[in-house]
Image (tube, rainbow, N blue to C red):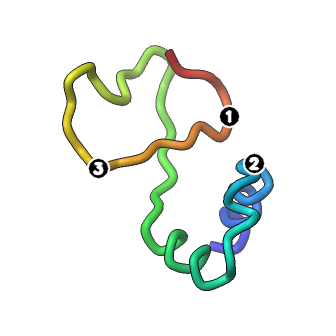
């Protein structure tokens, strides 16, 4: 998990400002996912409580 944590904290500036306890709580809950080109991530009108952070590539 340390390698993933390093990638994310380096990619998202606000995460690097979290205290260790908050960062540890967050890392227990996140799931890294990969999507293919043109793959649907969410649809307009979808309901949910998920948050997505784009670490590389682009989405529209």
The answer to whether residue 56 is above or below residue 60 is below
Q: Which of marks 2 and 3 is nearer the N terminus?
A: 2
- Residue 41's image quarter? top left
Q: Residues within 10 Å of mark 1 (few under 14, many from 20)?
A: few
Q: Is mark 2 on a helix, strand or loop?
A: helix
Specify the label residue 56 is tagged with: 1
Which residue position is annotated with label 3? 49
The answer to whether residue 20 is above or below residue 59 is below
Mark 3 and mark 1 residues within 8 Å of each other at the beta carbon: no
Nearer to the camera, 40 or 12: 12
**Residue at far bottom of view:** 21
- Is the N terminus in the top left, top right, bottom left or bottom right quadrant? bottom right
Q: How many marks?
A: 3
Give x and y (percent) for residue 51: 42, 46
- Left or right? Give the position of 11 relative to 39: right
Which residue position is annotated with label 2? 11
**Residue at far right of view:** 10
Q: Which of marks 2 and 1 is nearer the N terminus?
A: 2
Given this view, does label 3 or label 1 mark the residue nearer the observer?
A: 3
Residue at 21% x, 30% y: name it.
Answer: 46
Specify the label residue 38 is tagged with: none
Nearer to the camera, 15 or 40: 15
- Left or right? Give the position of 42 relative to 53: left
The answer to whether residue 26 is above or below residue 33 is below
Q: Is mark 3 on a helix, strand or loop?
A: loop
Q: Distance between the residues labelled 2 and 1?
A: 9 Å
Q: How far apart are marks 3 and 1 (CA)?
A: 22 Å
Residue at 53% x, 21% y: name it.
Answer: 59
Mark 2 and mark 1 residues within 8 Å of each other at the beta carbon: yes
- Left or right? Give the position of 49 relative to 4: left
């Amino acid at each position: 998990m340390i390698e993933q944590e390093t990638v994310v904290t380096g990619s998202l500036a606000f995460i690097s400002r979290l205290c260790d306890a908050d960062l540890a709580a967050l890392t227990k809950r996140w799931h890294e996912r990969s999507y293919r080109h043109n793959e649907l991530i969410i649809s307009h009108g979808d309901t949910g409580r998920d948050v997505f952070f784009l670490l590389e590539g682009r989405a529209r």
